[in-house]
Image: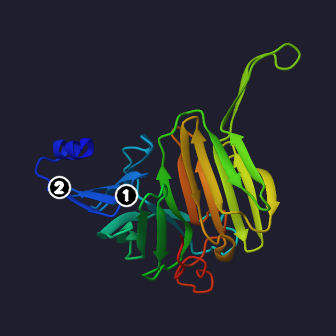
């Protein structure tokens, strides 16, 4: 009832409808859906920039006041790129505009399902149409997200640099990141280290901050787990292996978020990344920027991304 009141205060003319089937409850206003599975609550926008506005479990919001798009993409434009080394003098980067055309949803006896249809638009009519399906099941404490992509346009001298599913978080400053390797090996690393100054060890207090953490399946039979202090410093690799477990998590002392990608090795290259700065951000790179950029209309190069269900 408190959430409905907030919607009425924010938009006094909004029409509020509530639908409950089984244990799932969905409350809709003119441009927002509030969904409650019994163990998980979240808010989903239904307008042109539809995204997950907030996510709550056990009274704790791990996502709050989020307006960032669910999907992002970047193109590299170059007339001299050879498909391997993208450090070319004439390169230019173009970021996509996230535009949603339609949000459809239904609530049945055991689940809430929403489908977001739209495209990542570049200029000159080049675009990446997408469908994002969100499924929240009765009494489930997790949200299932499926993404399907395609390419439309000419993409003349244009190459896809990255495509990312992302979710900014609202965690506390002190946090940890856990990463799943293979054969049951896990890494659990602190984001921020403090070193007090002690006689004979350090003359002055110091600190060390690791901002980026990734599980990167760069080939069907190879992955690596790494962390880095910044985007301009080299990665520190923890582990090499064959098939990553396909999950990572970020949390503070009150909890956090675990996110996973099915069949990472079968659709490599793929990467799970955490940006641990501020409240944190979870990123699933459907095409990571550590892999070579490719022409979207090349069916062989694009087979890991287009026509594939990313779940």
Q: Residue at x 36, y 44 (%)?
A: 65
Q: Nearer the viewer, residue 154 or 199?
A: 199
Residue 132: assigned label: none
Instruction: Specify whether 208 is left or right of 107.
Output: right
Q: Residue at x 64, y 58 (%)?
A: 247
What is the count of numbered marks?
A: 2
Task: Indicate how the structure is coloured in the image.
Answer: rainbow
Mark 1 and mark 2: span between their CA atoms? 19 Å
Query: Which of pointers 1 and 2 indicates the residue nearer the eye?
Result: 2
Residue 187 spot, x, y in % from top left: 74, 48
Q: Nearer the viewer, residue 110 or 44?
A: 110
Q: Pointer 2: what residue?
A: 16
- For disc 1, the neighbor class at 10 Å (few under 14, some 14 to 19, many from 20) is many
Name the image quarter holding residue 37. bottom left
Residue 1 spot, x, y in % from top left: 24, 44
> Residue most toward the front?
22
Work out whether residue 122 can be spotted. no
């Amino acid at each position: 009832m408190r959430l409905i009141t907030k919607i009425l205060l924010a938009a006094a003319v909004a029409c509020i409808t509530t639908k409950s089937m089984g244990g799932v409850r969905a409350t809709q206003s003119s441009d927002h859906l509030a969904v409650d599975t019994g163990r998980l609550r979240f808010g989903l926008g239904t307008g042109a920039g539809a995204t997950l506005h907030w996510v709550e479990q056990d009274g704790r919001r791990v996502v709050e006041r989020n307006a960032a798009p669910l999907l992002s993409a970047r193109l590299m434009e170059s007339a001299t790129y050879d498909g391997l080394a993208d450090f070319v003098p004439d390169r230019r980067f173009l970021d996509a505009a996230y535009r949603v055309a339609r949000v459809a949803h239904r609530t049945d006896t055991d689940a809430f399902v929403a489908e977001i249809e739209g495209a990542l638009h570049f200029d000159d009519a080049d675009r990446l149409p997408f469908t994002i399906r969100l499924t929240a099941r009765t009494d489930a404490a997790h949200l299932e997200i499926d993404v399907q992509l395609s390419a439309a346009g000419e993409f003349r001298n244009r190459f896809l640099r990255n495509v990312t599913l992302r979710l900014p978080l609202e965690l506390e400053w002190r946090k940890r990141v856990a990463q799943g390797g293979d054969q049951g090996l896990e890494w659990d690393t602190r984001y921020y280290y403090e070193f007090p100054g002690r006689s004979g060890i350090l003359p002055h207090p110091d600190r060390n901050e690791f901002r980026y953490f990734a599980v990167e399946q760069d080939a069907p039979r190879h992955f690596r787990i790494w962390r880095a202090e910044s985007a301009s410093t080299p990665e520190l690799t923890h582990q090499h292996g064959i098939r990553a477990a396909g999950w990572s998590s970020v949390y503070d002392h009150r909890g956090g978020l675990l996110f996973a990608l099915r069949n990472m090795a079968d659709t490599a290259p793929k990467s799970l990344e955490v940006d641990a700065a501020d409240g944190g951000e979870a990123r699933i790179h459907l095409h990571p920027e550590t892999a070579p950029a490719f022409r979207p209309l090349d069916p062989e190069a694009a087979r890991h991304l287009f026509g594939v269900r990313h779940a």
